[in-house]
Structure formats: C-alpha cells, structure tokens
Image (tube, helix red, strand yellow):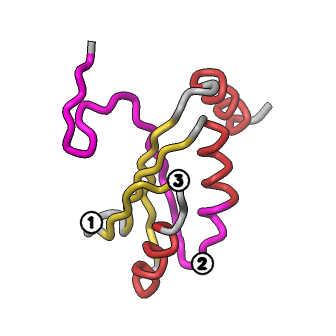
C-alpha cells in the first residue's frame, strides 16, 4: 500500500462519517483567477470564496458531509477546472469563531 493510500485510510478512519469543514487554497493562472473563483463559488458545498494576494490566489471554505465527500469534491469537481495550477486542502480541527459567532469550547 502506497503513502497516498495509507493517508487516505488514516483520514477515512479518523473522520469516519463526521462532517468535515475544509479551507481550500488555490493557485491559479493570473489571467484566469476571477473566472476560477466564480466557477468555484457555484458549487453548493462551497460556503465562501475569496480572491486574495500572497502565496495563493483563491481561498474557499467548504463543508462536506464526510471525508469521502471532501475527497470526491477535490478529485472530481475542483481538479478539472481549467487554469488551476495547485491546490492545498486544510481540514478544520476546531472552529472558535464562525460567521461572527464565537463558539463555546468545553
């Protein structure tokens, strides 16, 4: 079993069927960044999309039913978009404040 398969199994085992929130950073061809941001914003699972400066061009926040949904989205919906050079997916462990509401963490 390769490293990728091992990581996939670990992530699936850890998250199981729990909801997953992810921050996805996207590096894009500069001329296509706005078009890509608009395309990403049309996906129902995407909650927020930002065109930003710095090391990445677009940041998207998404909420998935489970880890399998996240994996499926990245591979089947995001990857085929023309002009995307690279993506990084950050899975949220704990949200302390979301949509302006501070969460009580016990």
Q: Is residue 80 above or below residue 99?
A: below
Q: Residue at x 59, y 63 (%)?
A: 78
Is 95 covered by the magenta stretch?
yes
- Per the rendered image, the range of residues in magenta is 77-105
Q: Earlier in the sequence, mark 2 or mark 3?
A: 3
Distance from Cα at disc 1 to Cα at disc 2: 21 Å
Q: Residue at x 73, y 35 (%)?
A: 5
Give the position of the N terminus as an image quadrant: top right
Residue 106 in the figure: left or right of residue 58? left
Q: Is residue 86 above or below residue 33?
A: above
Which residue is at the front of the view, 36 or 41? 41
Q: Nearer the viewer, mark 1 or mark 2?
A: 2
| Contact, mark 1 vs mark 3 (Cβ under 8 Å) | no
Give the position of the C terminus as an image quadrant: top left
- Horizontal and vertical percent for residue 38? 45, 75
Distance from Cα at disc 2 to Cα at disc 3: 20 Å
Q: Which residue is mark 1?
A: 54
Q: Which residue is mark 3?
A: 45
Q: Nearer the viewer, mark 1 or mark 3?
A: 3
| Contact, mark 1 vs mark 2 (Cβ under 8 Å) | no
Q: Residue furthest bottom?
A: 31
Q: Is residue 96 above or below residue 82?
A: above
Q: Is residue 90 above or below residue 82?
A: above
Element under disc 3: loop
- Can you tell which mark lies on residue 82? 2
Q: Residue at x 52, y 53 (%)?
A: 45
Q: Earlier in the sequence, mark 1 or mark 2?
A: 1
Q: Residue at x 56, y 27 (%)?
A: 18
- Horizontal and vertical percent for residue 91? 45, 38
């Amino acid at each position: 079993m390769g490293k990728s398969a091992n990581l996939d199994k670990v992530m699936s085992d850890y998250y199981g069927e729990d909801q997953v929130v992810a921050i996805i950073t996207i590096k894009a061809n500069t001329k296509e960044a706005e078009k890509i941001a608009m395309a990403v914003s049309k996906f129902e699972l995407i909650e927020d999309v930002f065109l930003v400066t710095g090391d990445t061009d677009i940041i998207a926040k998404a909420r998935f039913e489970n880890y399998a949904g996240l994996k499926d989205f990245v591979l089947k919906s995001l990857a085929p978009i023309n002009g995307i050079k690279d993506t990084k997916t950050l899975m949220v462990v704990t949200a302390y404040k979301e949509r302006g509401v501070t969460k009580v963490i016990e």
